[in-house]
Amino acid sequence: MRRPDDGDGRVARRREQVLFELAKRNKADVAETFRAITEATAVALEVERTSIWRLLPDGNAIVCDDNFVRAQSRHTVGEILWARDYPSYFSAIAENRVIAAHDARTDSRTRELRKAYLELHGITSMMDVPIWHKGQPYGVLCHEHVGPTRRWTSDDEAFAANLADLASLALEAGERRKAERRWDAVVNAIQEAVFVLDGEGTIVQANPLAGRIIELAGGGVTLAERMELVEFRDEQGRVIPADRTGGRRSLNGEIVREINHLVFKRTGERRSYRITSAPMRDGDRIHSVVVVLADMTEEVAFDHLKREVLAALAHEFKTPVAIVKGYAQHMSKRPDTSPAERPMVAAIERASNRLQRLIDDLVEVSGISLGRLVLYREPVELTAMLCSVARWAAPMATHHRLVVNAPEAVTVSADRPHLEQAVRRLVDNAIRYSPPGADVEIAVAPSDNDVVISVRDRGIGIPADQQNRIFELFFRAHAGTPHDVGGLGIGLFMAREITVRHGGAMWFESEEGKGSTFYLRLPRAEVP
Amino acid sequence: MKSAGGILVVDDDPDLREFLRLMLTSIGFEVTSAANGQEALDDMEGHDPDLILLDMKMPVMNGWEFCRALEGRDSRPPIVVLTAAPDPAGRAAEVHAEGWLGKPFEYADLEAIVRRFAKSPAR
């Protein structure tokens, strides 16, 4: 048998060449890389059989992932060796060191393999090198020599160890690729467009839906191109400048969630998206941004239509109500209306007033939710305003005691009718949801920067599980309960919208059975 | 020679026109009515009202167009805008009207504003 001759360094150079070729190949396909490794090592080490064995998780067996037989130039898989049959061999493997058995049939570590394995394949010498994966033993790269016994040199061992390292790299690359594929499958399947932007705002990754948006825009991979091709508008329709887009803000560390309208300049098409963008960090550094766009065009259009219809409907109700109410008022003033008719006429008038209030509410709420609330600010003295609210509420509060607690005059800059309406809504609720005889206290508490108006009742309170929805439009906490006093569920929504538009905030404390306190905070600044 | 005085009601709703006619005549005013801006202009060919009660949303010729048609004239009667729009005062300001009433209106408000501009021969 010809021994590798290192006299002129040819063997060493060939081995280096093999390592170099294997190192530079793409290792993402694990099975293919394993086949390349077994072939290469068989040729470079001139070994008849080379194989990669995987240790099963419980360590009870090794399974052959690939076996290359040089004479037949053939790969096989599937052989299994059990620890119970070869305990010494398995304890040697468990030591995670190179097993260089020059004479495999007599070596204490491998001789149990003699009958069933070594003689069957004509193997005389064996060298096993451990393969590691994620810091754990994965299995062995096995070299099996046929013919006269062979002395494994330290160069042989070193070369085999290098190939075992390449097998580890292949396992890692394979794992990475599996994870990437899983992630790609998720990103490609979701119903949102996903973009990854680099530090310059250039799109470096886009899933198919994101690709379609780029197509719609006719390009726009860099931020500058994008701003040329697409106009970004905020929820109110105002143009968003390049440095205020969600992606750009996230590059400065912000997590942005908002509705944007995108106008594609090429076609003039306008679509609405819920945009979520978040920075991706590497330590303190933000290296890229992920932007997710959910198409909301239909929802936004439908929502707008709903509110437009609401506004139009309310408008159309007004003339008929004017006629009913007009005649009722006219008849109540006529001397020839009979005493028997008078209560009927009064009932018609009351009913039409109620109808009118409902219509006014609908008009107001549709106006606010369409963004049509315009505030006309003026100095408003709150004590006087709260007294006016109390006077307004008095006819409804015949069985309640209204207390206004305002120790000093406080003036804020506000839209008087709207602010008064917000407080009226709170007082109206306080009266409606508290038993006869209970106090309703309206108070004002100024501090340096702001002023807090509070409305407290000793009523039925808001159930804890309803509290987080209390400011939602059309939400009624007591709907369908014995405490249901009717209404549309718009009072608190409106009160809070008005407060927020004034730059203030509204919140509450409530305990079921004990009552609720609503707070309305307004900034004190800017009083002319 | 044109006749003068009274109130011209311009509204496309016949029931509302009839109600306003009944109500205003019952307190002594003379009332003529028109279903839209064009009819009102036709009526004004032979008649100068003291006051026009004007709806804004009407077919054929709406309130804005009617006011524009009157702009070129030397003088025009005072106009009170009568509208179901959410911001009646805003509509009134758009056409430089002398007053406004939101629909549905209070009987007392209607009477008060009408008395400010129109003479009632019965009183």
Image: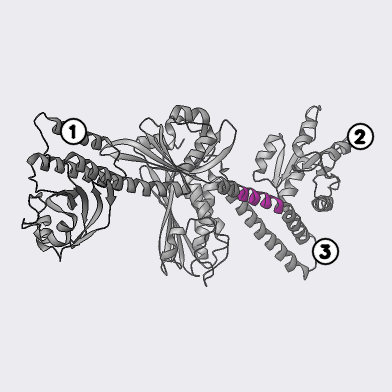
Instruction: Report which residue position mark 2 lands on.
Output: B2
**Could you tell me which secondary element the residue under label 2 belongs to?**
loop
- Residue at the (26%, 35%) spot, across then down: A24
Please state if A451 lies on the left or on the right of B82 as rendered. Answer: left
Q: Tell me, yes or no, whether the highlighted magenta stretch contains residue A226.
A: no
Closer to the camera in the image, A398 or A151: A151
Please state if A32 lies on the left or on the right of A498 as rendered. Answer: left
Task: Characterize the local packing of mark 2: few (<14), some (14-19) or many (20 or more) Cα atoms within 10 angstroms.
Answer: few
Q: Are marks 1 and 2 on the same chain?
A: no
The amino acid pointed to by label 1 is Arg
Of circles 3 and 2, which is in front? 2
Instruction: Report which residue position mark 3 lands on.
Output: A336
Q: Quadrant of residue A160?
A: top left
| Picture disc at residue A150 | none
Boundaries of the magenta span: A305-317
- Marks 3 and 2 sit apart, C-alpha to C-alpha, by 37 Å
